[in-house]
Image (cartoon, grey):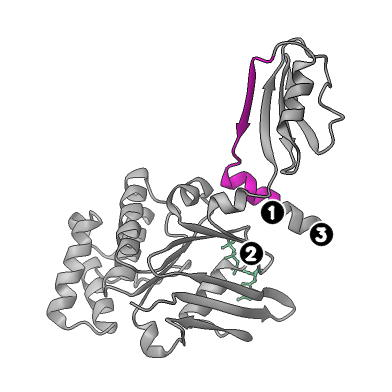
């Protein structure tokens, strides 16, 4: 397995007047589960399509293992496109065998791999049904099987979790973890940020075609404001309103939620609260990825 993973290097793309991507840059390392998040129209699908060579970039380069990607390398990629790419009238098993052979597997191996993923993704009862007769969630399971059936070296999945039931979400999560444990880089886009936070090693937040934040969720938290909850029952209303670097988010019955800039000394806030009487609670709440996302995207929009 190469040391360098999947590198998206300064990729730009316009559709007429629309700038879809501008200098998009990030790397998905071998064995890493990378969550690609952003608002609708931010540029995630465009990036993934360029990584797969389904779409040409105007500028920039995509590399795998340090080398520009060739057609041959792309056959070793597993891709789950957003628009889904199955043949509606083909039966599930036939479809998977066909796709596996298209990626270079011999007939016997293609059958074995197709049957293995059908079992793994709980599709046995559906294996001779036409894809179009399956529910959307089951079609999605087939789509995942299609991305995996040729044992790819890289996985690029566009919203693989959308529309899945909780059991299928668990199966999908498990499969992705196994693939990364085997050293494969996996990138997937999703609007389910709680899931991304729970599963991913690193996260990239894209806004208006640019990567605006990239790192572990803890890294994304550093430098961001945190939230303090203070319960000072005897404190007068508005006691925290004029502390520099502090915004009062809510205040009720002596309990305030404060948004605190990272340079503020929380002990000064505690001292100020104690000066009003007893302090029953003083706790710091870590921002969830959803809140970090809102902060980053909001900052990007007001610039
Ligand atoms: N074929 C196209 N022709 C013109 N504009 C396009 C085309 N495809 C995408 N765009 C535009 O490019 C930008 C990026 O779109 P893209 O589909 O990559 O976003 P996304 O992050 O995947 O969004 P979503 O979360 O809604 O799937 C958007 O402004 C979109 O309208």
Q: Closer to us: mark 3 or mark 2? A: 3
The magenta stretch spans residue 180: no
Residue of label 2: 41
Q: Position of residue 208 (x, y in %)?
A: 69, 66
Q: In the rendered view, tell whether residue 131 sits above or below residue 270.
A: below
Q: Which quadrant of the figure contains the N terminus?
A: bottom left
Mark with earlier residue (3, 2): 2
258 lies left or right of 302: left
What is the spatial separation of the Cα atoms under label 3 and label 2, in whole angstroms? 18 Å
Quick check: 208 above or below 265?
Answer: below
- Assign a secondary structure to mark 1: helix
Residue on which the image places disc 1: 296
Report crowding for label 1: few under 14, some 14 to 19, many 20 or more residues within 10 A (C-alpha).
Answer: some
Residue drawn at x 50%, y 78% as measured from the top left:
51
- Compared across the picture, whether 57 is left or right of 119 comes to right
Q: Position of residue 103 (x, y in %)?
A: 29, 82
Q: Nearer the viewer, residue 179 or 279?
A: 279
The C terminus - image quarter: bottom right
Distance from mark 2 CB to nearest ligand 1 atom below 8 Å = yes
Q: Quadrant of ligand 1?
A: bottom right
Question: Under 8 Å from ligand 1: the CB of mark 1?
Answer: no
The answer to which of marks 3 and 1 sits earlier in the sequence is 1
Instruction: Give the residue at x 66% y 69%.
Output: 209
- Residue 280 is inside the magenta segment: yes
Q: Which residues are magenta?
A: 279-297
**Closer to the camera in the image, 226 or 117:** 226
Q: Which mark is residue 303?
A: 3
Hey, which residue is sitting farthest left in the picture? 108
Query: Whole-Å distance between the Cαs marked 3 and 1?
Result: 11 Å
Residue at x-position 34% and y-position 73%? 87
* First of labels 1, 2 by sequence position: 2
* Horizontal arrangement in the rendering, residue 62 relative to residue 148 (left or right): right
């Amino acid at each position: 397995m190469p040391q360098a993973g999947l590198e998206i290097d300064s990729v730009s793309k316009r559709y007429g007047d629309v700038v879809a991507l501008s200098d998009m840059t990030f790397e998905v390392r071998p064995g890493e589960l990378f969550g690609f998040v952003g608002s609708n129209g931010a540029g995630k699908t465009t990036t993934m399509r360029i990584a797969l060579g389904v779409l040409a970039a105007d500028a920039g380069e995509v590399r795998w293992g340090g080398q520009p990607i060739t057609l041959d390398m792309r056959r070793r990629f597993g891709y789950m496109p957003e628009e889904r790419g199955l043949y509606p009238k083909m039966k599930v098993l036939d479809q998977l065998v066909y796709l596996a052979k298209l990626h270079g597997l011999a007939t016997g191996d293609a059958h074995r791999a197709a049957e293995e993923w059908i079992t793994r993704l709980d599709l046995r009862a559906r294996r001779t049904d036409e894809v179009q007769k399956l529910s959307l969630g089951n079609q999605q399971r087939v789509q995942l099987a299609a991305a995996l059936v040729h044992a790819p070296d890289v996985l690029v999945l566009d919203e693989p979790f959308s529309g899945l039931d909780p059991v299928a979400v668990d199966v999908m999560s498990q499969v992705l973890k196994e693939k990364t444990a085997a050293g494969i880089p996996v990138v997937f886009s999703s609007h389910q940020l709680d899931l991304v936070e729970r599963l991913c090693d690193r996260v990239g937040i894209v806004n208006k075609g640019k990567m605006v934040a990239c790192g572990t969720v803890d890294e994304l938290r550093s430098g961001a404001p945190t939230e303090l909850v203070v319960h000072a029952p005897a404190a007068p209303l508005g006691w925290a309103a004029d502390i520099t670097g502090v915004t009062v988010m809510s205040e009720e019955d002596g309990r305030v939620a404060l948004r605190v800039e990272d340079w503020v000394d929380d002990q000064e806030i505690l001292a100020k609260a104690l000066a009003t009487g007893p302090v029953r609670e003083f706790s710091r709440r870590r921002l969830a990825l959803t809140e970090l996302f809102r902060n980053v995207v909001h900052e990007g929009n007001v610039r």
